[in-house]
Image (cartoon, grey):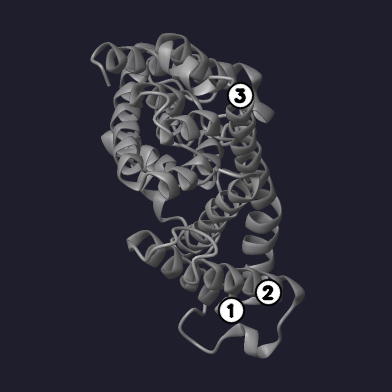
Amino acid sequence: MSLLAVLGDALTITGFVFAMMLIVEVVNVASGGTFQRIVRRGGAVTYVGSGLLGSTPGCLGSFAAVAMYVHGALPFGALVSNMIATSGDEAFVMLSLFPGKAVLLFTILLVYGVVVGVVTDRILGGRSYAGACCPSGLAVHETEQLRLFSRPAALEGCSFPRATLCLFLALFTLAVATGTLGPIESSWIRLSLIALAVIAFWISFWVPEHFLEEHLWRHVAREHLPRIFLWVLGILVLLKLAEAGHVPLAGMVRDHPWAALAAAGLIGLLPESGPHLVFVTLFAQGAVPFSVLVASSVVQDGHGALPLLAESRWEFFRVKAISLVAGLALGSVLLAAGL
């Protein structure tokens, strides 16, 4: 594979991730405070709801859980459930590389996260946030009006952000349709990429200007997209250079799965989207077993825990310590079982 092909793969993955992010952003805003209201009901619903919130691809579900926790609306165990269930921005990449295994992984993370969260609260007595809660409580704002089925907002004026998003998505759709990006032969993967890109284009063309600039442009396009592209491209180039230099990186990882498992857990402690992509890519190439990917996914939470780190380092390290133990435990069981 040439470096030009690596660039094409990085653009394909990034385009898929971008289209998915736009769609998820619309769903998150359109749902308003629905998930938050479900999570705050108490009982088993709290842990399942918090886990489902974390299962939402991207960082918003974890950000919401942290906000509820520091406002006293969520027990510590439910926060643990959320952090174990989340895969951050890497979820989009996994859906693009191995969708079937990704869905299975997300299901395992959700169930395991709920179990670990309940056990955590049973052991710790259902403790709440130890810091000072905001006296005004947790505010849930009204759902923004998304006019997806009315007159297109672009017809009222096309701003630079809207024109840029629409142009990028149009070019991406054309590149995939012609085989310039993505699979060369027609397949369900190509059709899925085209469908997602068309939906994302429709969203960018129709939504109101405020929503587009605040959510799609500033949050997704400017904050997430460059980082995802650079991480994906960097990792693919690194693996390509290792292959060209006859460095058996994939073979070394494949021959030492227990060391890879330990490394996956330790790297998962980093509160950042990106490092986890190393294990995502290696798994996609068949270099690491499913157990290593599971362990890495349990421990890492993208940058969903960064707001918690800003609030309290002690709470952040408690969550990470539990996630590390839980991730290494499950990963070890699966690896010992040959998975």
The disc, 2 or 3, on the residue closer to the chain's N-terminal end is 2
Q: Position of residue 276 (x, y in %)?
A: 54, 30
Whole-angstrom CA distance, mark 2 to mark 1, is 7 Å
User: Is 133 left, or right, of 38 in this rendering?
Assistant: right
The quadrant in which the N terminus is found is: top right
Residue that carries the numbered disc 3 in the rendered image? 270
Q: Position of residue 11 (x, y in %)?
A: 60, 54
Q: Residue at x 54, y 15 (%)?
A: 266
Q: Which residue lies furthest to the left in this view?
A: 337
Residue type marked 1: Phe
User: Is 86 left, or right, of 44 in this rendering?
Assistant: right
Residue type marked 2: Arg
Q: In this view, does 84 lie above or below 52?
A: above
Residue that carries the numbered disc 2 in the rendered image? 162
Residue 36, visible in the rendered structure: no
The quadrant in which the C terminus is found is: top left
Residue type marked 3: Leu
Q: Do the residues labelled 2 and 1 touch (CB within 8 Å)?
A: yes
Residue that carries the numbered disc 1 in the rendered image? 205
Whole-angstrom CA distance, mark 3 to mark 1, is 37 Å
Q: What element carries label 3?
A: loop
Q: Residue at x 50, y 66 (%)?
A: 176
Q: What element carries label 2?
A: helix
Q: Quadrant of residue 261?
A: top left
